[in-house]
């Protein structure tokens, strides 16, 4: 079960990352942003592409090496920042229904990854 959850988390991050890297304009539209200069488009590729791909690869490493588990826990902390910041934004009136939908997805991502890592730690200790 841990491998399934970690695979799901890894593929989620990789999917977001590949989308961000290859289609920054589509990514911007999905999150209601607009790059006004080439630098902005590059930043979308870097943050929504490169960062998410790196997190996905780090999570994928947990599937082949127990040694990657502590590093993957760092991804969990990064992902936890998403719903926490989203809640803050929503309290400021930023995001509306779209923000609530993203919040639900972010909470689900944290739960899946957290449970997957917990089960993987138990399996590694056994």
Image (cartoon, helix red, strand yellow):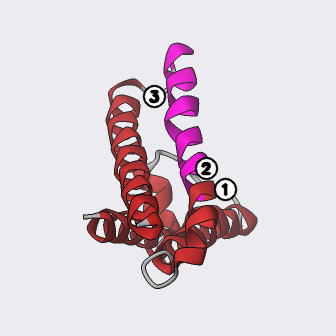
* Residue most extreme to the front: 126
Q: What element carries label 2?
A: helix
C-alpha gap between disc 1 and disc 2: 28 Å
Q: Judge by depth and name the residue closer to the eye, 21 or 68.
A: 68
Residue at position x 34%, y 71% from top? Answer: 7
Give the answer, above or below, for where 111 lies relative to 96: below
| Number of numbered discs overlaid on the protein picture | 3
Residue 36 has which mark?
Answer: 1
Query: Of helix, strand and loop, which one carries label 1?
Result: loop
Residue 102 image point, x, y percent:
38, 40
Q: Is the magenta stretch mostly helix, strand or loop?
A: helix
Mark 2, other Cα within 10 Å: few <14 / some 14–19 / many ≥20? few
Residue assigned mark 2: 78
Distance between the Cα atoms at labels 2 and 3? 20 Å
In the displayed structure, does residue 84 sit left or right of residue 103? right
The answer to which image quadrant residue 74 occupies is bottom right
Q: What stretch is highlighted in magenta?
A: 75-93
* The one of 124 and 79 positioned closer to us in this rendering: 124
Whether residue 44 can be seen here: no
Q: Quickly name the residue at label 3.
A: 95
- Residue 9, given in percent of the width and then of the height, sits at 38, 63
Measuring 39% from the left and 24% from the top, which residue is drawn there?
Answer: 96
Q: Which is closer to the viewer, label 1 or label 3? A: 3
Q: Distance between the residues labelled 1 and 3?
A: 21 Å
Please, is residue 118 above or below residue 67 in the view? above
């Amino acid at each position: 079960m841990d491998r399934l959850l970690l695979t799901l988390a890894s593929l989620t991050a990789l999917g977001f990352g590949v989308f961000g890297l290859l289609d920054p304009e589509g990514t911007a539209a999905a999150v209601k942003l607009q790059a006004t200069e080439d630098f902005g488009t590059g930043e979308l590729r870097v943050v929504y592409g490169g960062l998410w791909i790196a997190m996905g690869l780090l999570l994928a490493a947990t599937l082949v090496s127990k040694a990657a588990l502590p590093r993957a826990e760092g991804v969990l902390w990064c992902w936890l920042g998403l719903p926490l910041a989203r809640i803050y934004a929503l309290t400021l009136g930023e995001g509306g229904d779209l923000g609530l939908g993203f919040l639900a997805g972010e909470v689900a991502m944290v739960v899946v990854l957290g449970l997957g890592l917990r089960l993987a730690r138990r399996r590694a200790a056994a």
